Image (spheres, coloured by chain):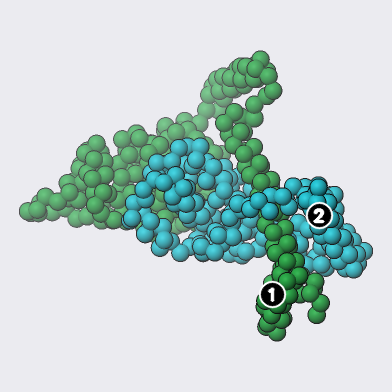
Chain colours: A green, B cyan
Amino acid sequence: MNNEKLIQRYFLNELSNQEQQEFKMLLKKDKNFKHELTFQKNLQKVIKAEERSKLKAKVREFEQGIDTGNAPTTFWNSWMVAASVLLLIAVGWFSYRSLFSVNYDNLFASNYKEYPNTVYVITRGDSVETLERKAFAAYDSGDQVHAINYFKQLQKNNNLDYLDFYLAQAYLQSDSVQKSIILFEKILENNKLFVGESNWYLALAYLKLGDKINATKYLKKCVADYDYMKEEARKLLDDLD
Amino acid sequence: MNKEEQKTFEALKNGSEETFKKVYEDNRLKFIHFARKYQLSEEESIDIYQDAYIVFYENVTLGKLTALKSTISTYIFSVGKYMIIDRLKKNKKTIDSELALSMAQDDSISVEALLEGETTLTQEQMLLQKFFTLLGGQCKKVLTLFYYRGFNIAEIMIEGGYNSENVVKSQKSRCLKQLKELIKSNTAL
């Protein structure tokens, strides 16, 4: 096989065992062969860098869109567009509210139930007041301010799988909705416990924020991927439609 | 990977621009939140996120990643984590030993895949890059399909609408020769 073809097959990862031997031998003994291979390897790296910088330019463009909302070209244009958008939103919002308003607060209230403590049994006779006991006692009694505090302390020294979930519950009950969303999403990302449950509560958290798009997204996931609250999710999707 | 993720994965593989943008946006905020604990500035976090996302995307489109053991987000975050460590080292910030260990134990992505992602060019390669950009569109296309996308001659023939494999072969050789001549004539000055 000629050297050119051998190098070509090398780049395509197609060298047979015998060809690999030949390749190694040439690399040792033939300076021109080595030189040609280095040239093509450098070229490959250059092309890769080129393609990468194209991709980087593309994602940077997305970023600009996120920051400025695809900004128009001039200062006055941007103000005019912003003002028109605000006006449209305001008009749209009032018409929408008066005609077809979905009452997210009511939907949340009629679907939300605090998740019971299923992980820590509290008995009256407990003689040792552990941090975990304090946390779940506060959680069970609805004292979420203290529950949050204790759960956070627990997190520092323990790697208990369910802490994120109950902390998220406590946040959601105490109206720190954004904080609960971050934790529920983290659970979906990493955990094995309470995943279906977190998905349902994420939908409810977004509902509480009036974010129909994300609420719908997670409700659809509830229906498609999990058993927990599947029927309730289906019904809620109909209500939102 | 659930069904929805599988769909997204396939769409990315097939070059859907819309999905490329959507996946970028879906994971962006989560990554920024995640990167906060490493005390990087928001700009640095975004920069790392972009690089990690590009590595992920390249691995999907170039066929190096054919299936995911976990989720798309987990993959991007794993790449990002390595890149954060790298950045911290370069910034000479101390790295918590536990953090380093937890990162090293993350086996959802191979280190080789990341090393391959390194695109810092040497002086010589930068010069080569300059001349590569001077080549005509056809040459750039053929060489990119071969060296970047990993297409063989027959695949390039179909993709580029060439009449025969021989035409592709000679086009590729001509382009390499042209590139070498460009370098020669400029370095001889």
Percent across and percent down for residue B5 are: 57, 56
* Horizontal arrangement in the rendering, residue A176 relative to residue B19 (left or right): left
Q: Which of A190 and A8 is in front in this view?
A: A8
Residue under the point 44% across and 44% down: B91
Name the kind of residue labelled 1 in the image. Answer: Leu
Q: Residues within 10 Å of mark 2 (few under 14, many from 20)?
A: few
Q: Which mark is residue B184?
A: 2
* Horizontal arrangement in the rendering, residue A31 relative to residue A232 (left or right): right
Q: Which of B146 and A113 is in front in this view?
A: B146
Please tell me whether residue A57 is drawn above or below residue A82 in the rendered image: below
Q: Do labels 2 and 1 share a chain?
A: no
Residue under the point 36% across and 54% down: B99
Please tell me whether residue B97 is drawn above or below residue B34 in the rendered image: below
- The residue to which callout 1 is attached is A27
Residue under the point 57% across and 42% down: B25
The residue sitting at the right extreme is B163
* Horizontal arrangement in the rendering, residue A10 relative to residue B83 (left or right): right
Asked whether residue B40 is in view, the answer is: yes
Q: Could you say whether the residue bearing mark 1 is in a helix, strand or loop?
A: helix
